Structure formats: structure tokens, C-alpha cells
Image (cartoon, grey):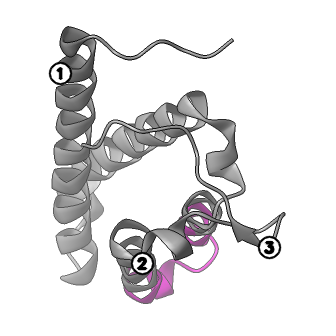
Amino acid sequence: MKKSKLSEKQFWFQRIGKTSLRAFHILGITGAGGGILLGVAQTEWIFYWCMAMTTGSLLMLWEIVRDWRWLIQLKGVLTLVKLGLLALFIPFSHLKPELLITVLLLSVVVSHGPAGLRHFSVIHGRRIDARKEVKG
């Protein structure tokens, strides 16, 4: 059964919700990233790290619930790769700045790359458009 169109109230709730999550995610990345790149003690930036991880997880969950195909599109796959790179912070703590820079560069590709790249399915070998999404 096809889902009905969002009401204006639902649209605005989702749009403001996603935009707010993204804003807090960027704030968290900025705070943690600054601490990591400038070699500041972890106690000074851990709050921002937790904010970035929480909001990033919520944004990822949002996308998966909206359409599971996000997981096989390049934007989803690269997000999972970014999580893998962040997990390398533990065994390779001396490489945190380099890993963070790599994650940030991948984020630009995921966020600002052309739709044909972001929506490319690694399973099908072609672009797969998902359901209409609420930007934010």
C-alpha cells in the first residue's frame, strides 16, 4: 500500500526535527573535531563527541526507517565506512587527527556529491532512488 502524502504539519515537524538534529550533529562534530585536531584533553571535548555520536546515530536511524535502501546506497555505505574509521580511534589513537580528517572528507562526498553518486546502489550497480525524503 502506498503511503499518503504528508500533511503540512507533519512535513514541518519532520523538517524542523531533522534540521535540528543535523545542527546539533554539526555542533558536536565541531567541538570534538576541534579538540582532536588541536590536541586538547579528551575531558574538554567528550561532551561534543557524545553529542555527535548520538545525533549521528539518530540521523542514521531516521534514514533507515524512512527507507532501508539507504543501507545499500553509496550514502549509507559511506556512512558505515565512516563509523568503521571512527572505531579505529581505539586501536590507533595516535592517528585520530588523520582518521577524523578522512571522515570529514567522506562526509562532504556523502552530503554534497551529485545524486547519481549518493544514490548509487552497491548491490545493483546503478542509481536507485529511494522514497521522497524530507530535507533537513
Task: Tell me the CA gap for discs 3 and 2.
Answer: 18 Å
Tell me which amino acid carries mark 2.
Val
Tell whether 8 sits left or right of 79: left
Closer to the camera in the image, 22 or 65? 65
Q: Disc 2 designates what residue? A: 109
Pick the quarter of the image with the N terminus. Answer: top right
Magenta stretch: includes residue 18: no
In the rendered image, the vertical position of residue 84 relative to residue 20, given as above or below:
below
Of mark 1 and mark 3, the one earlier in the sequence is: 1
On the image, the x and y values in percent for residue 91 come to: 64, 74
In the rendered image, the vertical position of residue 8 relative to residue 100, given as above or below:
above
Could you say whether the residue bearing mark 2 is in a helix, strand or loop?
helix
On the image, the x and y values in percent for residue 111 come to: 36, 66
Pick the quarter of the image with the C terminus. Answer: top left
Whether the residues at callouts 3 and 2 have beta carbons within 8 Å, the answer is no
Task: Tell me the CA gap for discs 1 and 3.
Answer: 34 Å
Which residues, given as a range, are shown in magenta?
82-100
Residue drawn 17% across and 35% down? 20
Whether the residues at callouts 2 and 1 have beta carbons within 8 Å, the answer is no
Could you say whether the residue bearing mark 1 is in a helix, strand or loop?
helix
Q: Which mark is residue 125?
A: 3
Q: Which mark is residue 12?
A: 1
Tell me which amino acid carries mark 1.
Trp
Viewer can see residue 89: no
Badge nearest the viewer, 2 or 1: 1
Of mark 3 and mark 2, the one earlier in the sequence is: 2
